[in-house]
Image (tube, rainbow, N blue to C red):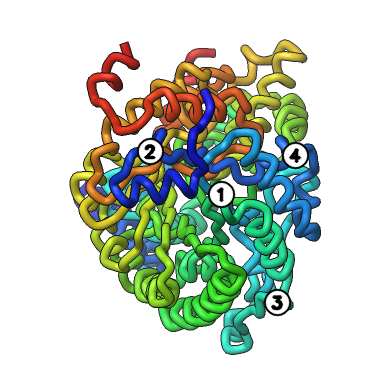
Amino acid sequence: MKDRMTPLERAKAIARGEMADRLPCNPNVANGVARVYGCKISEFNSNARLIAAAQVASYRRFGYDGVRIFTDLFPWAEAMGAKINFPVDNTADLAAPALGDLSDINRLEAADPYKDGRLPVHIEAMKYLIEELGDEVPCAGGIVGPFTNAFFLLGIERMSKLFFTNPEVIHRACEVSLETCIRYAQAIIDVGLTPTISEPMSSCTIVGPRHFREFGEPYIKKLVHYITNQGNPVTMHICGKTEKIWEDIVAMGIAGFSVDNVVDLQKCKEQVGDRVKILGHVDPSAVMYAGTPADVRAAVIKCVQQAWDSPKGYVIMSGCSLPVETPFTNIEAMMETAREIGYPIDPEKLDKMLR
Amino acid sequence: MSDIKSKLLLDLADSVVNMDEEQTVELAKNYIAHNLDPYEGINQGLALGMDRAGTLYEEEEYFIPELLMCSDAMYAGLDVLRPHLKQDNLEDNHKIVIGVVQGDTHDIGKNLVKIMLETTGFEVIDLGRDVPPLDFVNTAKEIKADIIALSTLMTTTMEGMQEVIRLLEGENLQNQIKVMIGGGPISKGFADKIGAYYAGDASKAAVLAQSLVKEV
């Protein structure tokens, strides 16, 4: 099936309550775009044109409803001094946090998005992306939020213990982290893209609501406000369990909330769907990576059944970034199912599709 | 069981659950000073505390930071009790090679599983994080391990898990060396697909490992 609208036309039509061809659908292909384009993931570390070209190639192939410049969780921590492992053809990972000795906490400085680490490469990639696709698909710049980034400044395990032993250090790291995020968000906005925030460490799978509220929420909220005050809607993704902090997240004033597949989608819609658009949550591992196209189809339909009538809107999405080796056939099946479901949603048709 | 012993065991467990490293050390010293069995101190005191912490994690009362503090307290207690263990109390006949698959450097989950396995009597060889698939298989062959335990937090490393199983099958070792996997993105469905055993969390990993060596 072919789409009859561009993603931008579709998003605008649905927002106005007009007719559209289908629900928006974003499989969240991430670094898998390297497989579509035919390059090594490590080439993204220095080649802005390539990052954009791979994003464009993947969008053209699958026709999904959002593109984003975001290669891994660590460019901001790296720009502030963290050491990163760069595998030749896989996603980068943290090798050593920015801060060795905790007593150096006051030497930690916010990064300059136009100078430090890979940040300038990403900003440049955003320019190419919006030049190429800006008039047909929403273009986003990804940011890792200030709380999660603080973990990479202090070290994940060390910061976890500092909650109990040295809260001041965490607050300081979050403050500097926030300044980096704000500068980067401004750079994204200046290029004309929309910032989206990933906050994986805020998840209740990792950190409890008590620590989130004390150390995470105040800083994340400031970043959200910084972006929304300039008239930009913000979508936030948090991996893992989040139910206990839904109200906190929504109260920050985000426009979209992208949820992990471990979350009860229907319950999420019922509790916060009146205040925030919900995006999710096809299982990126068991279904998208390890399942068959038929599994993908069933999973997409079940997600739509649970959340299509969410008052502030719903976007079909994977529960997290797809594994790099996710079969193309499964990504195509996700898009095809969205097209097959069509718009407006007919609940009876969904039931029939599952039979 | 004497009153003092059962009280000390309970206190040991409580101090682990309460994340109190200093108190755990004091209690462990007191426990040894009473000439009590260090093996029981570990299994029915420290490990029980860690078990309860694990339950609190499942109930979403505790989270990763709390578990790390508990495990620090538990390790501090272990350091006191371990030197007093008689060698023949150690069930060192069952060995497990554990590590985080290449491409991932998150090892919180792996470390918790290791603690659980050690306190249930396994000899655990820890290859650390970012480990190439072949290293798991070579080490397991070398030390005649019963189980390879693979952990990951990242979807990007799941291929590596499958590769370990392929390597074992290539040498026809898949029945001698069982593979158990776990971590954030891992599902039972994925484990079944690649022919591995699935452990939902650290305490379930310990129970699973025990049942796997009994099967052999």
- Identify the residue at horizontal 48%, vertical 27% (top origin): A287
First-in-chain label (4 vs 1): 4
- The chain that hosts pointer 4 is A
Amino acid type indicated by mark 4? Tyr
| Between A77 and A37, the one nearer to me in the picture | A37
Image spot of residue A151 (x, y percent): 53, 66
The residue tagged 3 is: A114
**Image quarter of the C terminus of chain B:** top right
Element type at mark 1? loop
User: What is the distance, in whole Å, between disc 3 and disc 2 at their CAs?
Assistant: 39 Å
User: What is the distance, in whole Å, between disc 4 and disc 3 at their CAs?
Assistant: 27 Å
Element type at mark 4? helix
The residue tagged 2 is: A20
- Identify the residue at horizontal 62%, vertical 56% (top origin): A69
> What crowding class fits label 4: few (fewer than 14 Cα within 10 Å), some (14-19), or many (20 or more)?
some
Same chain for labels 2 and 4? Say yes or no. Answer: yes
The image quadrant of residue A161 is: bottom left
Image spot of residue B46 (x, y percent): 38, 50
Amino acid type indicated by mark 1? Glu
The image quadrant of residue B12 is: bottom left
First-in-chain label (2 vs 1): 2
Element type at mark 3? loop
- The chain that hosts pointer 2 is A
Give the number of marks: 4
The residue tagged 4 is: A37
Amino acid type indicated by mark 3? Tyr
| Between A129 and A240, the one nearer to me in the picture | A129
First-in-chain label (2 vs 4): 2
